[in-house]
Amino acid sequence: MELVQVQNLCKSYPDAELGEFKALDNISFVARAGEVFGLLGPNGAGKTTALRILATILQPSSGTAKVFNFDVTTQADYVRHSIGFVSNNTAIYDRMSAWEMVEYFGRLYALHSDHLYPRMEKIFRKLQMDEFRNCPGAKMSTGMKQKVSIARALIHDPPVLIFDEASLGLDVMVARALQAIVLDLRDQGKCIIYSTHIMREVERLCDRVAIVYKGKILDTGTLPDLANRHNQNDFEELFFELLMQEDVDLRMQRSPVSLPIAGVSPALRPSPFGSNR
């Protein structure tokens, strides 16, 4: 079942030099229940822009995006009730305890006490948060804060979870625990969209992946599909080859292609990557 549908999505901003900067350039993908769909790309590729549009934080310039069959532009309130959003810099209130923060978000989603408190107990136990449930945000470690972010994203039991570079800055143990949580949510039938620039996370977590670069999706598929399509079994090499080819294509579009000059050695012809030396 397709729970996220993105079609020809674009997001542009005014730019003093270019006239227009395309943060997203006509991207399309779907994400299904019971899978982890990865958005893999370097910083600035457009991953966060896409996820903020899905979370109704940003408005698209054109194209459509639906979450749980609700349009992000015209049915934003319904979309917000259908998602949980976890990033690497979600704010935590310094004076509120872990328990108080998760309870507060449960109240925002209009959860009744009879349902809210048993669910909080279950989530705190699952995420191993009982030891710091009364700890104020100002005294929490980075790992503790990230667990609170995950708990409040889960409190209303949304069908779609969005993780935007959620492991950034976490130590190895906490990052590993985060991965286990993501896989458990997938096994519960949730639709997970997982943004990262870390190859190992993609290989460990993602059922399918879209490679994003300069606002475009260069290719989408399972890792075996991508390996077969590009005749490259090393996924890291495949990733960098796609990015380099995209850079070459962009340069060729911007500059006229010159025909080879008779008598000039190929070694002396301009390289698309810069100097031949």
Image: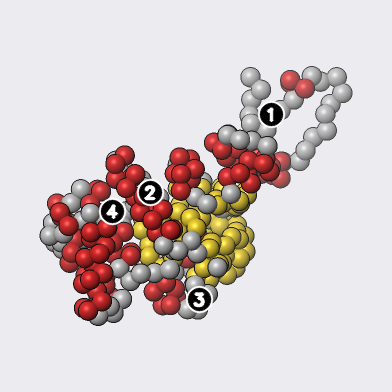
Of residues 78 and 249, which is closer to you in this image? 78
Q: Looking at the image, which residue is at 48% across and 61% down?
A: 34
- Can you identify the residue that label 1 sits on? 271
Q: Which of marks 3 and 1 is in front?
A: 3
Residue 62 visible in the displayed image: no
Choose top left, top right, bottom left or bottom right for residue 24.
bottom right
Q: Looking at the image, which residue is at 63% across and 19% down?
A: 277
Q: Earlier in the sequence, mark 2 or mark 4?
A: 4
Do tag 4 and tag 1 residues touch (Cβ < 8 Å)? no
Q: Position of residue 43 (x, y in %)?
A: 46, 45
State the colouring used for the structure image: secondary structure
Secondary structure of the residue carrying tag 3 is: strand
Number of callouts in the render? 4
Secondary structure of the residue carrying tag 1 is: loop
Q: Earlier in the sequence, mark 2 or mark 3?
A: 3
Find residue 146 and name its label: 4
- Can you identify the residue that label 2 sits on? 179
Q: Where is residue 269 in the image (x, y as percent from the top left)?
A: 74, 25
Question: CA gap, disc 3 to disc 1?
Answer: 48 Å
Q: Position of residue 194 (x, y in %)?
A: 45, 54
Would you call the spot at circle 2 few (<14 residues within 10 Å), some (14-19), or many (20 or more)? Answer: some
Would you call the spot at circle 1 few (<14 residues within 10 Å), some (14-19), or many (20 or more)? Answer: few
Q: Which of marks 2 and 3 is in front?
A: 2
Residue 264 visible in the displayed image: yes
Find residue 70 and name its label: 3
Question: CA gap, disc 2 to disc 4?
Answer: 12 Å
